[in-house]
Image (cartoon, rainbow, N blue to C red):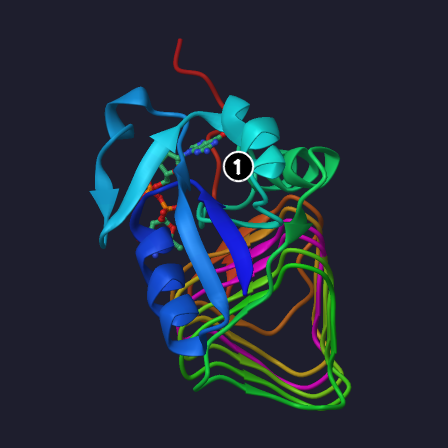
Amino acid sequence: MARVIGLGAGGHAKVVIDALRLAGGHELLGFLDADRNQWNRTVLGVRVLGGDDWLPRLLADGVTHAFIGVGAVGQGSPRPRLYRLLCDAGMKPLSVIHPRATVSPHARIGAGPTILAGAVVNADARLGDDVIVNTAAVVEHDCDIGHHAHIATGARLSGGVAVGDEALVGVGASVRQGIRIGARAVVGAGAVVVDDVPNGAIVVGVPARPLATKTTVAP
Ligand code: JB2
């Protein structure tokens, strides 16, 4: 049975705990969190042990796997850094796949995926490392999802959609077949994406358009 810890003990972590308990085969020993106010608290009965500096001693204690409990992606998200931290510490990124997720045997899944209840990943889809396919999200056939990307709750990607590294497709968004969403781009909640989205862009609405930014300064 794999001995496991989680990094980040907030809301997303609770959903991951449920998935792990249903999937079985893991012993979840605790969380590490950057916020010292969380230390010694429990999340769904799992104790927050301390900060990320605990990683080496946990490895020495036989903890072999870790998952990232932080859901946020994009600018300023700690997910890519935490992923490197756990790998550099000598732990393996844990694969979290809810027993009621549907993952095609013909999908190619990178290291450390988080695929939650009711999610669907169809044939010939490819997920990079550390990808979240959140509750009831759909990743259709031939999609190509970059490292650390997050397909949020209820989002739907049609066939052949490409999502860049660290991009976020927001809650309930829909993306038309074959669209390319750039690295670190953000698709707003409920958006309907019918045109390609450049790297780093934020698009919202139906149909999705770039978020207006203030380009003039009042005198
Ligand atoms: O570097 C870090 C670090 N940075 C933030 N190391 C560790 N070990 N922990 C870190 N954290 C911790 O992650 C924060 O101190 C906080 O306790 C936790 C993030 O929790 P929060 O509830 O703020 O966000 P979340 O990522 O769990 O949930 C968001 O994303 C989900 C997908 C929310 O928007 C949820 O509503 C959403 N479902």
Residue at x-position 45% and y-position 17%: 217
- Return the x and y of residue 130 as percentages of the image width and height: 64, 55
Membership of 167 in magenta stretch: yes
Residue at x-position 72% and y-position 39%: 90
- Return the x and y of residue 175 as percentages of the image width and height: 57, 75
Membership of 174 in magenta stretch: no
Residue at x-position 51% and y-position 64%: 208
Majority secondary structure of the magenta segment? loop
Closer to the camera in the image, 20 or 173: 20
145 relative position to 36: left or right:
right
- Return the x and y of residue 32 as percentages of the image width and height: 42, 35
Location of residue 191 (image quadrant): bottom left
- Return the x and y of residue 141 as percentages of the image width and height: 70, 88
Give the magenta part as a residue range: 147-169
Tag 1 secondary structure: loop
State whether label 1 is within 8 Å of ligand 1.
no
Q: Is residue 41 above or below residue 123?
A: above
